[in-house]
Image (cartoon, rainbow, N blue to C red):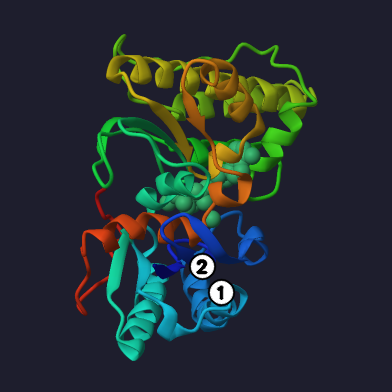
Amino acid sequence: KRILAIETSCDETAASVIENGKIIRSNVVASQIESHKRFGGVVPEVASRHHVEQVTRIIEQALAEAEVRPDELDAVAVTEGPGLVGALLIGVHAAKAMAFAHGLPLIGVHHIAGHIYANQLVQPMQFPLMALVVSGGHTELIYMEQDGQFETIGMTRDDAVGEAYDKVARTLGLPYPGGPHIDRLAHTGSAEMDFPRSWLEPDSLDFSFSGLKSHVLNVVHNQKQRGEEPNIPNLAASFQESVIDVLVTKTRKAVDRYGVKQLVVAGGVAANKGLRSALEDEFSETMTLSIPPLPLCTDNAAMIGAAAFYQLEKQSFAGWDLNGRPGMDL
Ligand code: ATP
Ligand code: MG
Ligand code: FE
């Protein structure tokens, strides 16, 4: 069965054709990073306008690369939420138009379900599983007893980890988005600064990154006031070590508490080299660990097609009243 999937929740216009929830026939992503860079972050109105300009071409390209005609599709899937409302609406309307014109069922997908199901494109998901979701807007531990069942057992109380990366990067004078730059510099620096870890209550599986972010801001500010030149690689390495220590330790707790068969990692920050290798060291010998390759960690439509497949199997379709839901719950 073939699904055309569309993703426009933030600043990537993406379309993909996925077969049986796991085979990537095409995966096209048009990034808007260059347009948002000069503002140091995503400007919602600019994002919507780019999506309008790009979405038709990206869908056509996804079908062409897959060598699939619309009448060979079984459904059209689209990210319903969460995300920027104007951005979501472009994808939702494009999906409705495709579904209506070709008489196909329409499937609304939660963006984070998509990030998690990116793992299905790599190896079969084994339930029960634990998902560590680390992205620009989310930092969560999600327990999944079976397909389509999501129980959030830990989440950030303030900043998402990707958000903390981007804000710290801005303080360090690095371009947007800062995550990859901090990651790269962290490997050249030394984590000698012993930054704080926010463990919260002893058995809490929640996260908090705003204290660490403020700490980095203060250190840089104080160094500059004293006329010292901040050592950017060492700051990056120390920040990244604190983040990874907390993420790995809490994930270990969650995995042990729920006795899962598999750990899957999801979201843009799963592209982080330091985090990937720390998770491999901690988990790969004792359980099945799945971390998608980099292009499937950051926003893409293939993951939306993967998540839509179990909804297609259940015939869980959306109506023509499908709408963008910026604050959608999992
Ligand atoms: P959400 O998925 O929560 O709605 P989003 O879609 O904006 O948010 P993603 O596209 O999943 O987020 O991830 C983008 C984030 O990942 C950015 O904050 C970016 O800095 C971060 N990121 C990307 N690569 C790396 C890396 N190598 N190290 C750390 N962070 C990274
Ligand atoms: Mg993005
Ligand atoms: Fe995302």
The residue shown at (60%, 40%) is: 271
Of marks 1 and 2, which one's residue comes earlier in the chain?
2
The residue shown at (63%, 61%) is: 33
Question: Which residue is label 1 attached to?
Answer: 62
The amino acid marked with disc number 1 is: Ala
| Residue 35, percent from left and from top | 64, 67
Q: Is residue 140 visible?
A: yes
Q: Quadrant for residue 75, please give it.
A: bottom left
| Residue 330, percent from left and from top | 26, 48
- Check if mark 1's residue and mark 2's residue have beta carbons within 8 Å: yes
Secondary structure of the residue carrying tag 1 is: helix
| Residue 205, percent from left and from top | 32, 21
Callout 2 environment at 10 Å: few (<14), some (14 to 19), or many (20+)?
many
Callout 1 environment at 10 Å: few (<14), some (14 to 19), or many (20+)?
many
Measured Cα–Cα span from mark 1 to mark 2: 5 Å
Q: Is residue 186 above or below residue 108?
A: above
| Image quarter in which the N terminus is found | bottom left
The residue shown at (59%, 17%) is: 281
Q: Quadrant for residue 110, please give it.
A: bottom left
Residue 196 relative to residue 108: left or right? right
Question: Which residue is label 2 attached to?
Answer: 16
Q: Is residue 324 above or below residue 179?
A: below
Secondary structure of the residue carrying tag 2 is: strand
Is the residue indicated by label 2 positioned so its CB lies within 8 Å of ligand 3? no
Q: Is residue 170 visible?
A: no
| Residue 47, percent from left and from top | 51, 69
Is 163 or 293 nearer to us in this picture? 293
Q: Is residue 116 above or below residue 87?
A: above
The amino acid marked with disc number 2 is: Ser
Say the numbered circle drawn on residue 120: none
Is 160 or 99 nearer to us in this picture? 99
